[in-house]
Amino acid sequence: MRKVLWDMEVGERNRIVEIDCNSALRRRLMELGFVKDGVVLCVGESPLKDPKAYEVRGIVVALRGIEGKEIWVEDGYGIDSEINGV
Protein backbone atom coordinates (compact mmCIF):
# COMPACT_ATOMS: atom_id res chain seq x y z
CA MET A 1 0.00 0.00 0.00
CA ARG A 2 1.30 3.47 -0.89
CA LYS A 3 1.44 6.25 1.67
CA VAL A 4 3.53 9.30 2.43
CA LEU A 5 6.73 8.94 4.42
CA TRP A 6 5.25 11.16 7.13
CA ASP A 7 2.58 8.53 7.94
CA MET A 8 5.17 5.92 8.91
CA GLU A 9 5.22 4.78 12.53
CA VAL A 10 8.44 4.54 14.54
CA GLY A 11 10.09 1.21 13.73
CA GLU A 12 8.38 0.85 10.36
CA ARG A 13 10.54 0.07 7.32
CA ASN A 14 9.37 0.89 3.78
CA ARG A 15 10.60 1.31 0.21
CA ILE A 16 10.66 4.73 -1.44
CA VAL A 17 8.58 4.79 -4.62
CA GLU A 18 8.37 8.50 -5.51
CA ILE A 19 9.66 11.93 -4.50
CA ASP A 20 7.02 14.49 -5.49
CA CYS A 21 8.43 17.97 -4.80
CA ASN A 22 10.21 20.92 -6.42
CA SER A 23 13.56 20.29 -8.05
CA ALA A 24 15.72 21.95 -5.36
CA LEU A 25 14.20 19.95 -2.50
CA ARG A 26 14.15 16.79 -4.61
CA ARG A 27 17.86 17.16 -5.38
CA ARG A 28 18.69 17.75 -1.70
CA LEU A 29 16.66 14.72 -0.57
CA MET A 30 18.37 12.57 -3.19
CA GLU A 31 21.79 13.79 -1.99
CA LEU A 32 20.82 12.63 1.50
CA GLY A 33 19.95 9.15 0.18
CA PHE A 34 16.20 9.37 -0.40
CA VAL A 35 16.15 7.70 -3.81
CA LYS A 36 13.58 5.56 -5.62
CA ASP A 37 13.64 1.95 -4.41
CA GLY A 38 15.73 2.93 -1.37
CA VAL A 39 14.75 1.48 1.99
CA VAL A 40 13.87 3.90 4.77
CA LEU A 41 13.30 3.23 8.48
CA CYS A 42 11.46 5.60 10.82
CA VAL A 43 13.67 5.70 13.92
CA GLY A 44 12.04 8.42 16.01
CA GLU A 45 9.82 11.43 16.36
CA SER A 46 9.87 14.52 18.51
CA PRO A 47 7.34 14.91 21.35
CA LEU A 48 5.20 17.17 19.15
CA LYS A 49 5.53 14.73 16.20
CA ASP A 50 7.45 17.21 14.03
CA PRO A 51 10.20 16.53 12.98
CA LYS A 52 10.60 12.78 12.57
CA ALA A 53 13.90 10.93 12.17
CA TYR A 54 14.53 8.43 9.38
CA GLU A 55 17.45 6.12 8.67
CA VAL A 56 18.37 5.86 5.03
CA ARG A 57 21.62 4.41 3.63
CA GLY A 58 23.11 4.17 7.13
CA ILE A 59 22.55 7.78 8.19
CA VAL A 60 19.81 9.34 10.28
CA VAL A 61 18.04 12.37 8.83
CA ALA A 62 15.37 14.51 10.52
CA LEU A 63 12.60 15.78 8.22
CA ARG A 64 9.79 18.19 8.91
CA GLY A 65 6.23 17.30 8.02
CA ILE A 66 6.21 19.50 4.95
CA GLU A 67 9.16 17.51 3.56
CA GLY A 68 7.97 14.08 4.71
CA LYS A 69 4.64 14.54 2.95
CA GLU A 70 6.41 14.86 -0.42
CA ILE A 71 7.94 11.37 -0.34
CA TRP A 72 5.81 8.34 -1.20
CA VAL A 73 6.65 4.92 0.19
CA GLU A 74 5.31 1.41 -0.18
CA ASP A 75 5.01 -0.79 2.87
CA GLY A 76 5.94 -4.40 3.12
CA TYR A 77 9.29 -4.30 4.87
CA GLY A 78 7.83 -4.81 8.35
CA ILE A 79 8.45 -3.39 11.80
CA ASP A 80 11.82 -3.24 13.54
CA SER A 81 11.05 -4.52 17.04
CA GLU A 82 14.26 -3.10 18.53
CA ILE A 83 13.18 0.43 17.67
CA ASN A 84 9.52 0.43 18.63
CA GLY A 85 10.00 -1.64 21.78
CA VAL A 86 7.77 -4.59 20.80
Image: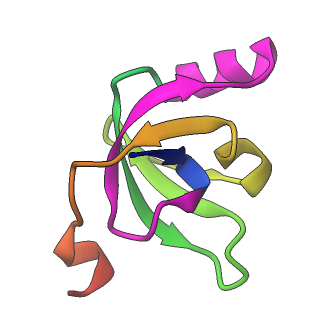
- Residue 51, quarter of picture: bottom right
What residue is shown at x 73% (from left), y 82% (from top)? Answer: 48
User: Could one spot residue 33 in this view of the protein?
Assistant: no
Looking at the image, residue 49 lies above or below residue 64 = below
38 or 53: nearer the viewer: 38
The residue drawn where x is 59% and y is 36% is 71
- Which quarter of the figure has residue 15? top left
Q: Is 71 situated left or right of 59 in this image?
A: right
Let me know if residue 73 is in the magenta part.
Answer: no
How many numbered marks have been drawn onto this rendered protein structure? 0
Q: Which residues are magenta?
A: 7-33
- Residue 8 locus on image (x, y percent): 48, 60
**Is 32 covered by the magenta stretch?**
yes
Q: Residue at x 79, y 48 (%)?
A: 66
User: Compared to 18, does 78 lie above or below?
Assistant: below
Q: Nearer the viewer, residue 77 or 29?
A: 77
Q: Is residue 5 left or right of residue 65?
A: left
Q: Is residue 45 above or below residue 23?
A: below
- Is residue 42 in sight in this rendering? yes
Q: Where residue 75 sits: x, y (%)? A: 33, 48
Q: Residue at x 73, y 54 (%)?
A: 64
Residue found at the very far front of the displayed protein: 1
Q: Position of residue 84 (x, y in %)?
A: 31, 79
Horizontal and vertical percent position of residue 80: 21, 67
